[in-house]
Structures are given as structure tokens and as C-alpha cells.
Amino acid sequence: MPFIAPSGTNFRTAPDISIPSLRQTLEAIADFIKSRDTYGYLLRFDDWWQHDGNQMPKGKLSWEAFADRYENEAAITASMPKRDGVKVGICGPGMEWYLRYSADPSDGIAFLDITVPAEWETDFLEVAEGLAPMEWVRSPAEEYYRFIRTGATPVNAGRAASREEPRIREARIGSLADDIPFGGGFAWIFKGKIVGAFLAALLLFLGYLLLSNLSYRF
């Protein structure tokens, strides 16, 4: 069966979490999803969306085998695909949710995002808030998937904070672009520089007209 990206809400960790934080997060997410599991097994993928846009099925995965993959830091790094930019993808057979994660042992940096259906969102917020002091960014799943595939910026995005800041902060589009790799290069568009350049050009034009008028009179 071909993979179908789920709808709902995407939650992703802020950039540069540690591999130990990833292990803790995977454990919490596994507990959250397993309590809602109706299939008894998972599907695994090599997720190439941010590498070349493809996705490679890797077969079924038992819950026990999944737990083995995040048992410790060494297990997490050993479970990673051996290509830069490729993430591990995990979903249920019904494809109503989708988990992606990566870990780079060379610098200790890890990343995770998960899409959950709308009816799970409130419950998942409690999980996210319990993973202090980690911060999360959220946006509609369709917008986020379009972003990572094409570079389009997600709309209606917000941050789900840890228990140290248990509020949902609405993220400005510019700061959201900074949050996600290769989005930050376009963030200046949303920070007022276009408006500033337009006003400067307008003032120069008005000054030119004034000087021209004075020169004509004298």
C-alpha cells in the first residue's frame, strides 16, 4: 500500500535537540500512540522527503522492535539510514499519524516531528508539555508537508511550549522560517525590509521632485 500523508496537526521539535532528548521523546510518543493502537504493529520507512522527495517502505515493525531502536543513544544512531538528510519514518497501518526523526552522532544533534489527527491534538499537547524544557512548533500538517517538499512557509503556525511555559504561542511567519532549515534565508521578507526599502525609494523620489521644482523657479 502506498504511503498517504495524514492530515491533522504537525508538531516538531525546535532545532538542535540532543540525542538523549530524542530518546526521551520517542519513549513518550510510543506510550502515547500505543495506548491508541488497534493494529499491533507499525510500518517503517526511509523518509527522503528532504533529500530527494521520495519515501522507501521498509516493511513492518513490531512495537518491541521499535522500542529496541530507542533503548539508548547507540541504538538510536544505529537505526538511522546511512545517508545525509534521510529520516526514519514510522506510522500505523491506517496512516492516521506519522512520526519522523533523525539523529547525527557526529554533532549530537537530533530532530523529530509527528503528525496526529485533530482528535488527538489536545491529548498530545499534554505529552509535549511534559517533555520539559523542550519546545515544539506546530502547524497544519498539509502546510508543513508542502513546506518541507517545496519550501512554502506553513501558515497558522504556533509553538507548543514545555511545562515551564505551558502556553501555545503564535509564531510570526518570519520566526517560523528561521526555525526550519532552509526557511531562514527568506525570513527577511517578513521582517519589514521590503516596506523600508519602498519608503526610502518614495522619499528619494519626493526629494527629487522638490529639487526639480526649486530649480525651475530659479
Image (spheres, rainbow, N blue to C red):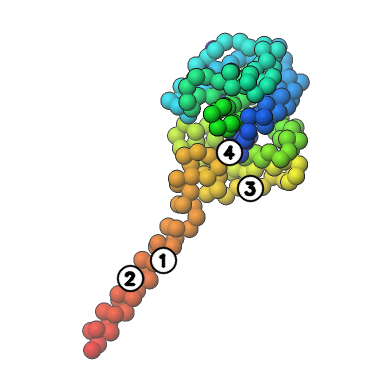
Q: Residue at x 71, y 24 (%)?
A: 27
SS state under label 3: strand
Local crowd at mark 2 within 10 Å, few (<14), some, or many (≥20)? few
Q: Disc 2 or 4, which lies upstream in sequence? A: 4
Question: Label 2 amino acid?
Answer: Phe
Lower sequence index among marks 2 and 1 = 1
Looking at the image, residue 164 sits to the left or right of residue 102; the answer is: right
**Which amino acid, mark 3?**
Glu
Residue topped by disc 4: 15
The label shown at residue 170 is 3
Dots 2 and 3: beta carbons under 8 Å? Answer: no
Residue under pointer 1: 199
Q: Report the mark closest to the observer, 4 or 1.
A: 4
Whichever of callouts 3 and 1 sits on the residue coming sooner in the sequence is 3
Mark 2–mark 3 distance (CA, rounded to whole Å): 38 Å
Can you tell which of label 4 and label 3 is closer to the viewer? 4
- Judging depth in this view, the residue of 117 and 57 nearest the camera is 57
- SS type, badge 2: helix
* Residue 119 percent coordinates (x, y): 71, 30
Q: Is residue 54 visible?
A: yes
What kind of element bears circle 1?
Answer: helix
